[in-house]
Amino acid sequence: MSTDGGFRRIRWLLGFGFFVQGFRGFPWLGANFFLTDELRVNPSVLQLLQNSANLPMVAKPVYGIFSDAVYFFGQHRIPYIAFGALLQAISWLAIVFLSRSNVSILALSIYLLLSNLGASLVEVANDAIVAEAGKQKCPSSSSQQSSSSTSGELASFVWMASSLGGILGNLLGGIAIKTFSAQSTFLVFGVLALVQFFVTINIQEKSLNLPENPSPAGIRKHFSDLSQVLRKPEISYSIAWIALSTAVVPVLTGTMFFYQTKFMKIDASLLGISKVVGQIAMLLWGFAYNRWLKSIQPRKLITFIQVTIGVFVISDVLFVKGIYRDLGVPDSVYVILFSGILETLFYMKNLPFTVLMTRLCPPGCEGSLMAFVMSAIALAFIVSGYLGIVLASFVGVTVDDFSGFTSGLAIEAICVAIPLVLTSWIYDETETKEKIKKKD
C-alpha cells in the first residue's frame, strides 16, 4: 500500500469524522429548544444539563490509554471510532422514538450522556490518528518540509472539516426547528452517525499506513508512560494554563440563551445563523492558521485569542445594557455577528495548542496524551459552566429578572483577564532555544 494512498485515506477518514462531530451542533441546538420549550427548564437547570452532559469527556485519558493499548482484530483506532459512532446513533434515535409521555429530564440526560460518551471515543481515536499521522511527512510535501509543518497542516485540515460540519449543522438546525420540530434534528443526526459507523467499519486500519507498534504495551505500562510524559514541565505547565484559562471564567451561556430567546424573543433561525457565523469564523481561523500562522509560536496566538475573548465579553456587557441599540444597531444584528463568534473563540485556542502538544508528544503515547489534553479542556469547560450557574445565582438572574445580567458579564470579563498573567506557562520553543544559547 503506497504512502500516498494511506494519507488520502487518512484525510478521508478524518475529514468525514470531524465533519460529523462538527455537525453535532445540529441536534444540540434542537436539544436546547426541546429542554426550554417542551420540558420548561429554567436558565440554571439548562446550563447544568448542558455542562453535566459533557462529563464523559473528562474520562478521555482512560479511553486514550485503551485506544493505545487494547487492540480489536489487530486494530486500535478504527474500532473505537466505529463503536463511538454507533453509540451516538443509538442515543439520538432513542430520544426520537420515546413517546412524549416518557420523555423526562432524567431520561434525556442519560441519552445525552451516552451520546457524548460515543463522541468522546470518536474524538480520542481521531485525535490520536492526527497526532500519529502528523509526525509523518506528507507525500505531497517537499523534502524540506518539517514534521511540525505537516502536523499543523493536518490539524488545520480537520479543524476546517469540523467547522464545515458546524456551519451546515447550525444553519440547518435553526431551519429544521422552525419548520418541523426539535426532535427532527435528533433523527437526522442519528441517521448520519449510523452512516459514519458503516463507512468506518469498511476501512482497514492497515490501509492508513499509521506507525506500527510491534509489541503493544499493556494498560499499566501506558498509564506509567503517560505519567512520565506529564512530568515534563513543557507539557504539564502548558496543559495547566489551557485548562485554567477556561476553568476560571464563569460563562453565562445558559443565561444568554434565555435572555435572547425568552426576553428578546430572538427567532430560532436567527440563533442558528449566529452559530453559523461562529463556525465560519472557526473555518477562516483554520484556513488562516494553515496558510499564514502555523510558523508563529502557539503562545503568541493563544494569548491573542484570550485577549480577544475579553474584548467580546465586554462587548456583551454593552449589548445587554442596550448601548448598541441606542447607536442604531438592531439586537438581531448583534446576535448574528457577535454572539456566535464569542462562543467559538473559547475553542479557537485549541488549534494552536493541539499543534503544540503534537510536537511535544513522544511516539507511542499519542492517544493517551491527546486524550488527557482534551479531557483537561472538557473538565475546564464543565467547571466554567458550573461557576456560571453560581454567578447567575449570585447576581440574581432568573427567568423573569435579568437586571443583574450586566454585573455577571462584567465579572466574567475580569476573570478572562486573570490567565493572561500566567502565559509564560505555555511552552515557547524560541524562548527555550534562546535560554539554551545564553547558558552556552
Image (spheres, rainbow, N blue to C red):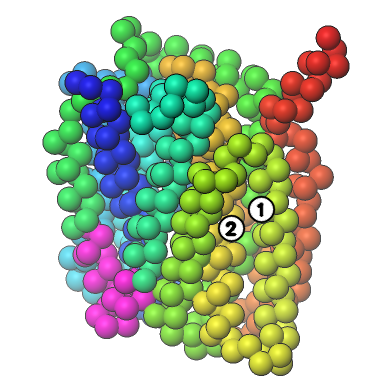
Which amino acid is tagged 2?
Leu
Location of residue 22 (image quadrant): bottom left
**In the picture shown, does residue 346 fall above or below 353?**
below
* Identity of the residue drawn at 44% across and 47% down: 159
Q: Percent position (x, y) of residue 271?
A: 46, 76
Amino acid on which the number 1 mark rests in the picture: Ile
- Relative height, residue 214 to residue 404 (above, below): above
Residue placed at 54% from the left, 59% from the top?
A: 344
Give the residues drawn in magenta, as a range.
172-190
Gap between marks 1 and 2, in whole Å? 7 Å
State left or right for residue 135 relative to residue 392.
Answer: left
Q: Secondary structure at mark 2?
A: helix
111 vs 148, left or right, is left
Percent x, y of residue 111: 31, 55
**Residue 75 % position (x, y):** 24, 23
From the viewer's side, name the closer residue of 282 and 423: 282
Residue 56 vertical position relative to residue 440 in the rendered view, above or below: below
Mark 1 and 2 residues: CB-CB less than 8 Å, in contact?
yes
Q: Quadrant of the C terminus?
A: top right
Front one among 27 and 430:
430
Q: Residue at x 27, y 41 (%)?
A: 12
Q: Is residue 166 visible?
A: yes
What predominant SS class does the magenta segment belong to? helix
Q: Quadrant of the N terminus?
A: top left
- Look at the numbered disc 1 and give the secondary structure of its residue: helix
- Residue 276 sits in quarter: bottom left
